[in-house]
């Protein structure tokens, strides 16, 4: 695991965008795993800026989003499908036939999950972007005694619904369930880019990267992956002193 800590979250976003854009520049038909939430917004802004400035195209890139709320149509303002159009797809030349997001409104969610897994099998992810939930969730893989490997429907924890209530008109409007890519699919990605900013994530960053590997903190399973880059701002990385120089992770101040 390579951990890089930057002073400001804007630098984190820029560095993350550069890593993603370099992947696309090297491999125009790369498969990207994409995330939602507040953290990737700055990254997508930088990607859009670069797209406008450079003659870089996303037309041959295939994407898979981690998750989608269950019961929300794609057209709902707070669906992750709308989020992706608003922040990235609507401003670039991604080919809609190559961008995949679970259909949260599917009549048969189990069939939707199986179809998503089938697509993931056909298109292994080169680079998976991840944010981090306050309870250690990645995608919507919530802490528990067991974690699912493949795409599945999940009951969202109250804390997760409360954290995401800021995007909805009322906390009660946050869907209770979601469809998420499983931990197994995430760990199959060739490379993983975990991006975390803000002081409220410092403790869960420490637990995820320096704590025991446990399903009680899904992000801790990232410690088992051979190619993970973690980008943090100063605030999110401020409790990592026991990681520096422990010989397990490489650590850089940028
Ligand atoms: N499903 C998403 C996650 O993919 C995201 O990582 C997390 C943290 O979001 P934020 O970056 O807004 O803190 O929120 C949601 O629950």
Image: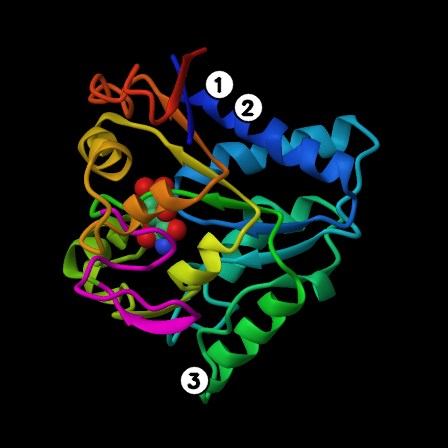
> Which residue is denoted by mark 3 in the rendering?
110
Q: Which residue carries the number 2 mark?
A: 14
Label 2 CA crowd tier, 10 Å (few <14, some 14–19, many 20+): some
Along the viewing direction, whichever of 209 and 168 lies nearer the viewer: 209
Disc 1 versus disc 3: distance between alpha carbons?
40 Å
| Magenta: main secondary structure | loop
At a point 24% along the width and 32% down the height, the residue shown is 210
Is residue 79 in sight in this rendering? no
- Residue 91: image quadrant is top right
Instruction: Tell me where the magenta segment starts and ends, as one range.
Output: 136-156
- Asked if the residue at tag 2 contacts the one at tag 1, i.e. Cβ–Cβ closer than 8 Å, the answer is yes
Front position among marks 1 and 3: 3
Confirm or deny contact between disc 2 and disc 3 (CB under 8 A). Answer: no
Is the CB of mark 2 within 8 Å of ligand 1? no
- Residue at 35% from the left image edge and 51% from the top image edge: 138
Q: Is residue 158 left or right of residue 119?
A: left
- Cβ of mark 3 under 8 A from ligand 1: no
| Quadrant in which residue 203 is drawn | top left
The residue tagged 1 is 11
- Cα distance in 3D space between marks 2 and 3: 37 Å
Give how far across and how far down residue 99 sits, in percent.
Answer: 65, 60
Q: Could you give the CA–CA distance between mark 1 and mark 2, rounded to whole angstroms?
A: 5 Å
Residue at left 47%, top 61%? 185
């Amino acid at each position: 695991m390579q951990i890089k800590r930057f002073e400001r979250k804007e630098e984190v976003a820029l560095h993350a965008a550069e890593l993603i854009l370099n992947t696309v520049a090297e491999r125009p038909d790369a498969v990207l795993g994409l995330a939602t939430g507040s953290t990737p917004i700055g990254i997508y802004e930088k990607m859009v800026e670069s797209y406008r400035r450079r003659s870089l195209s996303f037309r041959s890139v295939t994407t898979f989003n981690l998750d989608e709320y269950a019961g929300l149509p794609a057209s709902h303002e707070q669906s992750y499908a709308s989020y992706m159009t608003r922040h990235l797809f609507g401003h670039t030349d991604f080919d809609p036939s190559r961008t995949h997001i679970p259909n949260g409104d599917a009549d048969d969610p189990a069939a939707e999950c199986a179809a998503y897994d089938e697509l993931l099998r056909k298109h292994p992810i080169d680079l998976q972007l991840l944010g981090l939930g306050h309870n250690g969730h990645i995608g919507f893989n919530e802490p528990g005694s067991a974690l699912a490997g493949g795409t599945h429907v999940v009951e969202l924890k109250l804390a997760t619904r409360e954290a995401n209530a800021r995007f909805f008109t009322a906390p009660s409007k946050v869907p209770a369930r979601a469809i998420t890519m499983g931990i197994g699919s995430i760990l199959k990605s060739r490379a993983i880019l975990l991006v975390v900013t803000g002081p409220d994530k410092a403790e869960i960053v420490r637990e995820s990267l320096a704590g025991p590997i446990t399903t009680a903190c899904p992000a801790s399973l990232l410690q088992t992956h051979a190619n993970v880059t973690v980008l943090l701002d100063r605030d999110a990385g401020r409790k990592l002193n026991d990681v520096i120089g422990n010989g397990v992770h490489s650590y850089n101040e940028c």
